[in-house]
Image (cartoon, grey):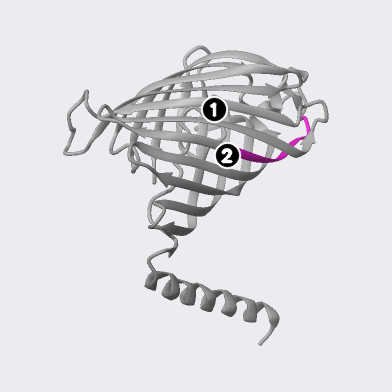
């Protein structure tokens, strides 16, 4: 047996034995590939895994999101009413500027991959939430930004080598009220690698989400939630400035489970697509997401 097969066998046996041991005790429970998702993606944060489209009526552009966040391992601590999960994240969002020859013209693309560790602890009125992420972000101009007839990049705008390797620590609290759910949070992140070098390594954000199922009754026997979400980000592109993103919408489905989301958004700040980080934009959007957790 070679080393690779031995390691795979060891990991497989370890997972089986861990599950048997943890399931017998009351102080710790282990789950491999737990159902659902522990830390719900932040509605107003651009850098989250989601599936959906955001349409900008002002110029007809689209932001297309494709991504997934999967919990691989979970550790439950019944005595302290807390939970720890390890997850992976793969996602990208693309800027579509036109529709030609029956295909979307993709101008720019931001890609992300990495993972996170999330921890929560339940109390009578809510729960403490936290997440630590390690993410690689790279950005690119794509063929939709290239003029084939002139054989040149459009608007004299050439690709910028853009990359960030960052760690991000988030702390927050989720309140459970008779009205619904209220989630507040703040985060700080630091980039160990960054290009271009003029970008600041330290950034942070604060935000909140309010969701209620008390205003609209069930539709097709499923819970319906109205929500508001807002986030303020301090980002150095290259000088530290405030970006803010505000959302209002409706979700057909339970707030922490799969469902269909329609929303309106208003964003002001550094361009969401990193190849244009030096631009400031003001954008109203109409969005659609599918929550897949």
Q: Which residue is at a point 42% across and 27% down the rendered structure image?
A: 209
Q: Quadrant of the N terminus?
A: bottom right
Work out whether residue 120 or residue 286 is closer to the camera in this orientation and state it. 120
Q: Is residue 217 left or right of residue 245?
A: left
Give the SS element for disc 2: strand
Work out whether residue 50 or residue 155 is closer to the camera in this orientation and state it. 50
Q: Residues within 10 Å of mark 1 (few under 14, many from 20)?
A: few
> Does residue 207 appear in this view?
yes
Q: Is residue 108 left or right of residue 194?
A: left
Q: Main secondary structure of the magenta part?
A: strand
Work out whether residue 140 or residue 178 is closer to the camera in this orientation and state it. 178
Q: Which residue is at a point 33% across and 40% down the rendered structure image?
A: 124
The percent coordinates of residue 138 (x first, y second) are: 69, 38
- Residue 290 counted in the magenta span: no
The percent coordinates of residue 3 (x first, y second) are: 69, 80
- Residue 168 counted in the magenta span: yes
Q: CA distance from mark 2 to mark 1?
A: 22 Å
- Give above or below for 65 relative to 17: above
Q: Residues within 10 Å of mark 2 (few under 14, many from 20)?
A: many
> Does residue 146 appear in this view?
no
User: Which one is closest to the eye, mark 2 or mark 1?
Assistant: 2
Query: Which residue is under mark 2?
Result: 92
Q: Is residue 221 left or right of residue 270?
A: left
Q: Which residues are magenta?
A: 160-169
User: Which numbered disc, 2 or 1, marks the residue that appears first in the sequence?
Assistant: 2
The percent coordinates of residue 60 (x first, y second) are: 50, 18
Q: Which mark is residue 100?
A: 1
- The answer to which quarter of the image holds residue 144 is top right
Q: Which residue is at a point 41% across and 35% down the rendered structure image?
A: 174
The percent coordinates of residue 198 (x first, y second) are: 82, 26
Q: Do the numbered discs 2 and 1 sit on residues whose CB atoms are within 8 Å?
A: no
């Amino acid at each position: 047996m070679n080393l690779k097969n031995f390691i795979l066998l060891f990991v497989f046996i370890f997972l089986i034995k861990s599950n048997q041991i943890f399931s017998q005790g009351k102080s710790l429970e282990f789950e491999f590939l737990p159902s659902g998702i522990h830390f719900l993606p932040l509605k107003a944060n651009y850098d989250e895994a989601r599936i959906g489209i955001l349409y900008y009526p002002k110029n007809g552009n689209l932001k297309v999101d494709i991504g997934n966040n999967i919990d691989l391992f979970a550790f439950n601590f019944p005595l302290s009413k807390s939970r720890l999960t390890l997850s992976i994240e793969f996602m990208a969002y693309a800027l579509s500027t036109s529709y030609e020859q029956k295909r979307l013209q993709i101008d720019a693309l931001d890609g992300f991959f990495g993972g996170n560790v999330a921890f929560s602890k339940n109390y009578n009125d809510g729960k403490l939430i936290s997440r630590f992420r390690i993410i690689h972000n790279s950005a690119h101009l794509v063929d939709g930004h290239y003029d084939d007839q002139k054989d040149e990049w459009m608007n004299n705008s050439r690709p910028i080598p853009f990359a960030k390797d960052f760690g991000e620590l988030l702390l927050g609290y989720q309140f459970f009220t008779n009205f619904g759910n209220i989630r507040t949070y703040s985060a700080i992140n630091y980039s160990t690698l960054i290009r271009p070098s003029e970008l600041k390594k330290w950034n942070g954000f604060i935000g909140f989400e309010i969701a209620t199922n008390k205003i609209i009754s069930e539709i097709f026997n499923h819970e319906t939630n109205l929500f508001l979400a807002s986030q303020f980000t301090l980002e150095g592109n290259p000088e530290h400035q405030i970006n803010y993103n505000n959302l209002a919408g409706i979700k057909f489905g339970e707030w922490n489970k799969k469902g269909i989301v329609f929303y309106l958004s208003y964003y002001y700040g550094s361009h969401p697509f990193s190849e244009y980080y030096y631009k400031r934009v003001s954008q109203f959007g109409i969005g659609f997401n599918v929550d897949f957790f």
